[in-house]
Structure formats: structure tokens, C-alpha cells
Image (tube, helix red, strand yellow):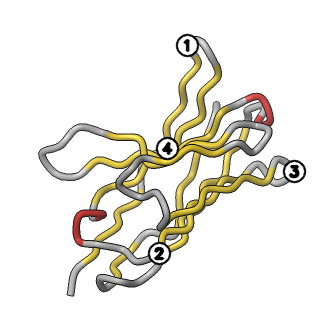
């Protein structure tokens, strides 16, 4: 069974940084587009960033310039470095593995709370 396990969430003050990691198992990791999504209370899940197997990354406007997504195809991991965090970044962050057109796996999520 495919597993995506997130780690690195927690509480941080505004302006701080967090590094989220996702470890994937039982998938051909290199075939998948890996992404991070988030869902805040009362809101829909939204894309934060994603990276192709070749390392091409895209970011949502809300985190562009403050976040970096990267992957290690040898270790089956994807990380999201987030800097200058804001209160509106508070959400549950989910790791996603996507293989077009319809293979889609999700982790259970990790909570990120940004507050003073």
C-alpha cells in the first residue's frame, strides 16, 4: 500500500520558517509529480507547490518567493521550505503524489500554525 508520510509541521511565530518533509513508499517515485497542498479551517484544499520528476517547480502566488519545494528521487522524499511565514499560512499541509491522468495519493497531513 502506498504511503506518504509528512513531518515537520508545528507552531511558529510570524516571520519564522518551517521545513516540511514527505517520505513516500511503495510507489515509483520518479514517475510522479509531487506536491504540497494545504487546507485551512472552512476553506477548500489548495495547491501550495509542486515539482515534476525532472525538478521543475511551480508555486501558488500566496507562497511564491517565500517557499522552495525540492525532491530527492533517490530517497523518495519531497520537502517544502517555507520562510517568512504569515498567519494566513496556518493550515493542515498535505503531501500529494500525482501520475496523470488519474493516479492520486495523499498523505494524512501535518498541522502548521503561525501565530504570536
Residue that carries the numbered disc 3 in the rendered image: 74
Which of disc 2 and disc 3 is earlier in sequence? 3
Residue that carries the numbered disc 2 in the rendered image: 83
44 vs 21, left or right, is left
Quick one: SS at disc 1? loop
| Residue found 41% across the figure and 58% down from its top | 63
| Contact (Cβ within 8 Å) of mark 3 with mark 1 | no
Quadrant of the snapshot with the N terminus: top right
Which of disc 1 and disc 2 is earlier in sequence? 2
| Residue found 64% across the figure and 33% down from its top | 2
Residue that carries the numbered disc 1 in the rendered image: 102
4 or 2: mark nearer the eye: 2
Quick one: SS at disc 3? loop
Q: Residues within 10 Å of mark 3 (few under 14, many from 20)?
A: few
| Contact (Cβ within 8 Å) of mark 3 with mark 2 | no
Which of disc 2 and disc 4 is earlier in sequence? 2
Picture layout, residue 4 above or below residue 1? below
4 or 3: mark nearer the eye: 3
3 or 2: mark nearer the eye: 2
Q: Position of residue 112 (x, y in %)?
A: 35, 67
Disc 4 versus disc 3: distance between alpha carbons?
A: 20 Å
Residue that carries the numbered disc 4 in the rendered image: 107
| Residue found 20% across the figure and 87% down from its top | 116
Q: Position of residue 101 (x, y in %)?
A: 59, 12
In the image, farthest residue toward the top: 101
40 vs 79, left or right, is left
Which of disc 1 and disc 3 is earlier in sequence? 3
Disc 4 versus disc 1: distance between alpha carbons?
A: 17 Å
Amino acid at each position: 500500500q502506498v504511503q506518504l508520510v509528512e513531518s515537520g509541521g508545528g507552531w511558529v511565530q510570524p516571520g519564522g520558517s518551517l521545513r516540511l518533509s514527505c517520505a513516500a513508499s511503495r510507489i515509483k517515485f520518479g514517475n510522479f509529480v509531487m506536491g504540497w497542498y494545504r487546507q485551512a479551517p472552512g476553506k477548500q484544499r489548495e495547491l501550495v507547490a509542486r515539482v515534476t520528476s525532472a525538478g521543475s517547480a511551480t508555486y501558488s502566488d500566496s507562497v511564491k518567493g517565500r517557499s522552495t519545494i525540492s525532491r530527492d528521487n533517490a530517497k523518495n522524499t519531497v520537502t517544502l521550505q517555507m520562510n517568512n511565514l504569515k498567519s494566513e499560512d496556518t493550515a493542515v499541509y498535505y503531501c500529494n503524489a500525482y501520475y496523470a491522468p488519474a493516479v492520486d495519493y495523499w498523505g494524512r497531513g501535518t498541522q502548521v500554525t503561525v501565530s504570536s
